[in-house]
């Protein structure tokens, strides 16, 4: 194994708060009254007011929360007594306008209440914030890499001239196992995370996932026979299950609310980037004898980065608060928000712990039996289900044929087409990342799924020759197919692709987050497996046109579900989101 790591690494080496004074707590006369409540050592400020403001005072354009070192930079530098009072009034008015949503003016995940001069979201991307994001996101990249690398690796492994083995002539069953054992392992890892995830914690679970990635990729690289290849693929899949369960929770629990949506959505970009990397490594290695070893083994350096990074980072402060480990939670939070005053850190951790103790005692069955957990569970599971059953595997199955008919590629250029679609998916994921904390989660979901339905209807109509004066084989029909395919891929990447995982990281209450996320992950991988299993039969019985229309019907059902039960979580702390279910 050590030899494999060394060889693979060698092979790819070239390739800002001043605190509120007592005057800042004065009533913004006569329109607001401020109540101070002390509970378990936590000083809370809750503002209730009737403010006759103008539409221009829309607080959605003023982030209430900042992070880390920005805690010290939220006030005007000309901090005279009068300006401090004016700033307090402005902050109270902003909070009053949001009183119908129950916003609490306290910091969250290291953030603090600020007034007019709150830094923009861009200034919240400190090195600490990015470190707490990047290493868990590598776990998602390794999942995406497996998706992109497997087809090229299988071609190399089964080639008489390129395999470099005597057992290249794999049966269809063996080939199917090489591809699907990672998915089976992901299901198994998700099930184990359901049982042990809340005891392991987010950090140790990610370390375990990285170690499984490392062992799986290393075994495949060194495999003397197909049996060891299959064992390595299964271990790698277990790593996918643990990592995809823990990463959304860790990122959500350590991110400032103002940029949490961006960061969790960027995890999807890492997944897509992993897919693209898999295509690229396949392209570079496919003509090398034993290239499949390099393709699968290239995951080893990334797995080492994941393990080393999570060994450096602390445990999630919210998980530590869940376990009543207050001192450790404060230490962890201080790592995520360097420069935050101790009283702010203590107040924040106390808020996390009070949110946990306010809820019912938790166990696995509490997720199903406690009424307040039913809606968030329905939100998370439905999004994971619809993400997989709205037709993405089927649509992409026909992608090569659609592009070939349009004259973009010959029959033997499927890998090139995959790279083109991978780049487009990455670009559209970037659009989602750039807009999710401005537009919100619901608008992107509703808009994106509407685009999915529209594109599926176009594809179905053209394939079934149901569009007047347009046939599937005509030039206009071919180009409409290409346009509809790109609309589908783009709409998916600004909606179900990133937003499903983002909301699953946000909506589940802390006391059941581990169990609920495990159920969501199981739903995702199980539905993926079922779609893959049933797709050939559906294609044979319904044909392309009927299959597209069937998926469009599922998309309409998804739109109704999203409109009915999915809340908007933009700009809210995880504790504020949890209060939505009370």
Image (cartoon, helix red, strand yellow):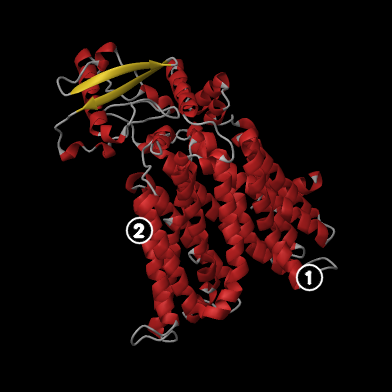
Provide residue 64's location: percent of width, then percent of height: 32, 31
- Nearest to N terminus: mark 1 or mark 2: 1
Provide residue 23's location: percent of width, then percent of height: 24, 13
Marks 1 and 2, how far apart in space?
A: 45 Å
Image position of 66 (left or right of 203): left
Q: For the point 43% across and 75% down, which residue is it? A: 459
Residue highlighted by disc 1: 170
Provide residue 286's location: percent of width, then percent of height: 69, 66
Q: For the point 56% across and 55% down, which residue is it? A: 524
Q: For the point 56% across and 77% down, which residue is it? A: 539
Q: Is residue 118 above or below residue 508?
A: above
User: Callout 2 environment at 10 Å: few (<14), some (14 to 19), or many (20+)?
Assistant: some
Helix, strand or loop at mark 2? helix
Provide residue 225's location: percent of width, then percent of height: 84, 60
User: Callout 1 environment at 10 Å: few (<14), some (14 to 19), or many (20+)?
Assistant: some
Q: Quadrant of residue 541?
A: bottom right
Q: Is residue 193 above or below residue 348?
A: below
Which one is in front, 68 or 351? 351
Q: Is residue 116 visible?
A: no
Q: Is residue 209 above or below residue 457?
A: above
Assign the C terminus to one quadrant of the image. Answer: top left
Q: Is residue 455 visible?
A: yes
Helix, strand or loop at mark 1? loop
Is the residue under label 2 in contact with that under label 1 (CB below 8 Å)? no
Find residue 380 and name its label: none
Residue highlighted by disc 2: 447
């Amino acid at each position: 194994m050590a030899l494999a790591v060394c060889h693979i690494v060698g092979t790819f080496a070239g390739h800002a708060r001043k605190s509120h004074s007592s005057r800042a707590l004065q009533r913004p006369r006569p329109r607001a009254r401020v109540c101070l409540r002390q509970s378990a050592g936590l000083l809370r400020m809750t503002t209730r007011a009737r403010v006759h403001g103008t539409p221009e005072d829309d607080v959605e354009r003023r982030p209430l929360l900042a992070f880390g070192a920005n805690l010290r930079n939220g006030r005007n530098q000309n901090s005279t007594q009068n300006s401090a009072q004016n700033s307090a009034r402005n902050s109270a008015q902003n909070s009053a306008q949001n009183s119908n949503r129950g916003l609490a003016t306290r910091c969250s995940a290291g953030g603090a209440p600020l007034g007019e001069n709150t830094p923009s979201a861009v200034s919240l991307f400190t090195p600490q914030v990015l470190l707490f994001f990047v290493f868990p996101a590598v776990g998602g990249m390794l999942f995406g890499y497996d998706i992109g690398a497997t087809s090229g690796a299988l071609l190399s492994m089964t080639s008489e001239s390129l395999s470099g083995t005597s057992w290249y002539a794999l049966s269809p069953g063996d080939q199917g196992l090489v591809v699907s054992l990672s998915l089976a392992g992901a299901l198994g890892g998700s099930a184990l995370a359901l049982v042990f995830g809340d005891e392991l914690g987010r950090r140790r679970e990610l370390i375990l996932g990285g170690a499984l990635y490392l062992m799986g990729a290393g075994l495949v690289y060194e495999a003397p026979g197909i049996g060891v290849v299959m064992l390595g693929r299964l271990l790698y899949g277990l790593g996918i299950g643990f990592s995809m369960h823990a990463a959304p929770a860790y990122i959500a629990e350590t991110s400032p609310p103002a940029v949490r949506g961006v960061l969790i959505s960027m995890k999807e970009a890492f997944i897509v980037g992993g897919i693209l990397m898999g295509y690229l490594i396949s392209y570079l290695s496919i003509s090398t004898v034993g290239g499949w070893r390099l393709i699968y083994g290239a995951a080893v350096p990334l797995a080492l980065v994941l393990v080393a990074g999570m060994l450096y980072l602390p445990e999630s402060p919210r998980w530590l608060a869940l376990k009543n480990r207050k001192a450790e939670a404060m230490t962890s939070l201080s790592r995520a928000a360097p420069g935050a005053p101790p009283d702010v850190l203590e107040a924040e951790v106390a808020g996390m712990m009070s949110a946990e103790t306010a809820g019912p005692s938790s166990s696995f069955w509490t997720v199903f039996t406690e009424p307040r957990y039913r809606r968030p569970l329905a939100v998370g599971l439905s999004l994971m289900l619809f993400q997989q059953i709205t037709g993405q595997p089927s649509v992409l199955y026909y992608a090569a044929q659609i592009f070939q008919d349009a004259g973009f590629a010959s029959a033997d250029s499927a890998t090139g087409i995959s790279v083109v679609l991978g780049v487009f998916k990455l670009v559209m994921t970037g659009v989602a990342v750039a807009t999710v904390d401005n537009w919100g989660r619901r608008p992107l979901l509703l808009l994106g799924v509407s685009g999915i339905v529209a594109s599926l209807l176009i594809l179905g109509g053209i394939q079934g020759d149901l569009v007047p004066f347009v046939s599937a084989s005509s030039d206009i029909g071919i180009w409409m197919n290409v346009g509809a395919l790109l609309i589908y891929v783009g709409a998916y990447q600004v909606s179900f692709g990133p937003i499903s995982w983002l909301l699953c990281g946000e909506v589940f209450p802390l006391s059941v987050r581990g169990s609920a996320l495990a159920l969501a992950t199981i739903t995702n991988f199980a539905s993926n497996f079922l779609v893959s299993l049933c797709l050939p039969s559906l294609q044979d019985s319904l044909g392309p046109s009927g299959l597209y229309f069937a998926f469009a019907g599922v998309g309409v059902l998804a739109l109704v579900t999203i409109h009915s039960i999915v809340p908007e979580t933009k700009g809210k702390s995880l504790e504020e989101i949890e209060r939505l279910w009370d």
